[in-house]
């Protein structure tokens, strides 16, 4: 049998010479500075690790209810999560980075999910998908529990069920979070200070609304 | 489904036999419903059984809060020869949620009656084995009633599994 040898690249000799030049310290002053600026990129370890982790999330093969149908679709051709490097669904929680709670969680199921979550290795993230998992949705009855009550959730995806695009958006938000530049909410983006929802009795309003007067006040009469 | 005329005829037949048995009828979206007196539910279902409605396709409970009487028990009767259906509804109050059991006439009503008892607290008098069927036997309250408080039950992990309902309690 003939042994095939790997072809040596054509510019191998040139590169060898360049390397030897560099080692000899031929470059000096501005040349050396430009040489370094062109070839060296500085960053922090956190950013580099975050970049790598955010681009290779391994989700867990895990579906709970009807939202799982939409979750299945994010792997298919239309919203293909393989474009972002998240297509490797792992069958074991010990190999997965991300758990997507896709559906309603009953009180009996919650400890099981918590055990799966505890079996996952750090770093790990969780997405709560759909209304049931976040706020119990249409199945708001004695048997269900919202996921925030038994495990930490990084991203909530609303919808009943959310479309695959919505889940994809949630996963990309999670990627931003992992890479250390979580996107600001719409209030920060549009500078909408003072539009936060207040629960009754949570805060005193500084000024009453227009045409609201106390009993006996005749200022507006 | 019987049409509206046939429903009224059936109701009148029942009234002729048992004058207090049918309180009202309803024909809504082609669904014929007899609203029956809960005390005479065995007589009503027995008469329908004689007419050919030999099967209870479904037996379920409803909570009509805040209407009174609050609880309802629905019997979906099926005539398998003519493929004809008729609903029988009986309303019972929450203070006295008693209704006669029909298990001896329709053995298939056994588990549904237990489920209605479990979820709504309707007591089926004469049921041979009226226990909870879905919830733990020491569970308190009837979880499908509209005024049942939701969200207070703790999630049981290994460390606190003895605090819940069921075999450890």
Image: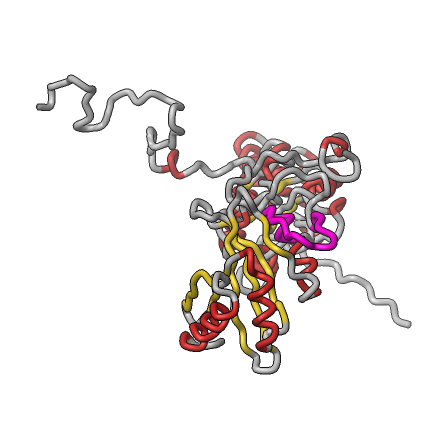
- In the displayed structure, would residue B88 be above or below residue A54? below
Q: Residue furthest right?
A: A1
- The stretch drawn in magenta includes residue B126: yes
Residue A24, how many percent across, how many down?
Answer: 69, 35
The N terminus of chain A - image quarter: bottom right
User: Taking A200 as reference, is B132 above or below it?
Assistant: below
The quarter in which the C terminus of chain A is drawn is: top left
Q: Is residue B77 above or below residue B113?
A: below
In depth, the one of A93 and B47 nearer the eye is B47
- Foreground residue among A41 and B99: B99
Tell me if I can see residue A187 in this picture.
yes
Q: For residue A64: magenta? A: no
Which residue appears farthest toward the top when viewing the image?
A: A216
Residue B151 in the image, given as x and y percentages of width and height: 57, 37
Relative placement, left or right, of A10 versus B16 is right
The residue sitting at the left extreme is A221
The magenta stretch is B114-133
Residue beneath the point at 64% across and 36% down: A150
Whether residue B117 sits left or right of residue B13 in the image: it is right
Q: Nearer the viewer, residue A103 or B117?
A: B117
At a point 34% along the width and 37% down the height, the residue shown is A190
């Amino acid at each position: 049998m003939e042994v095939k040898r790997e072809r040596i690249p054509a510019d191998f000799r040139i590169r060898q010479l360049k390397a030897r030049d560099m080692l000899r310290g031929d470059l000096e002053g501005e040349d050396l500075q430009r040489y370094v600026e062109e070839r060296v990129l500085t960053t922090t370890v956190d950013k580099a690790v975050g970049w790598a982790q955010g681009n290779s999330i391994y989700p867990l093969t895990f579906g709970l209810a009807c939202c799982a149908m939409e979750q299945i679709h994010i792997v298919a051709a239309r919203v293909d999560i393989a474009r972002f490097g998240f297509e490797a669904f792992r069958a074991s929680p010990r190999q997965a980075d991300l758990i997507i709670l896709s559906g309603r969680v009953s009180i009996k199921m919650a400890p099981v999910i918590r055990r799966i979550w505890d079996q996952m290795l750090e770093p790990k993230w969780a997405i709560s998908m759909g209304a049931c998992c976040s706020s119990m949705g249409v199945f708001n009855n004695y048997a269900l529990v919202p996921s925030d009550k038994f495990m930490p959730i990084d991203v909530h995806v609303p919808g009943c069920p959310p479309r695959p695009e919505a889940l994809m958006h949630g996963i990309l938000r999670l990627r931003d979070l992992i890479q250390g530049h979580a996107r600001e909410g719409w209030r920060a983006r549009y500078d909408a200070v003072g539009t936060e929802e207040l629960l009754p009795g949570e805060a005193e309003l500084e000024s009453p609304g227009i045409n609201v007067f106390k009993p006996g006040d005749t200022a507006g009469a | 489904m019987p049409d509206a005329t046939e429903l009224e005829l059936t109701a009148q037949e029942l009234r002729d036999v048992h004058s207090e048995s049918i309180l009202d009828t309803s024909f809504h979206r082609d669904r014929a419903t007899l609203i029956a007196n809960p005390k005479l539910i065995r007589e009503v279902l027995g008469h329908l059984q004689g007419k050919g409605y030999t099967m209870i396709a479904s037996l379920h409970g409803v909570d009509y809060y805040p209407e009174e009487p609050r609880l309802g028990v629905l019997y979906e009767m099926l005539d398998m020869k003519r493929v004809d259906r008729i609903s029988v509804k009986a309303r019972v109050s929450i203070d006295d949620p008693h209704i006669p059991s029909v298990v001896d006439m329709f053995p298939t009503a056994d588990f549904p009656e237990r489920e209605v008892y479990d979820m709504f607290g309707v007591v089926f008098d004469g049921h041979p084995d009226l226990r909870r069927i879905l919830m733990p036997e020491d569970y308190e309250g009837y979880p499908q009633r509209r005024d049942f408080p939701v969200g207070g039950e703790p999630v049981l992990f290994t460390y606190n599994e003895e605090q819940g309902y069921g075999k450890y309690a």
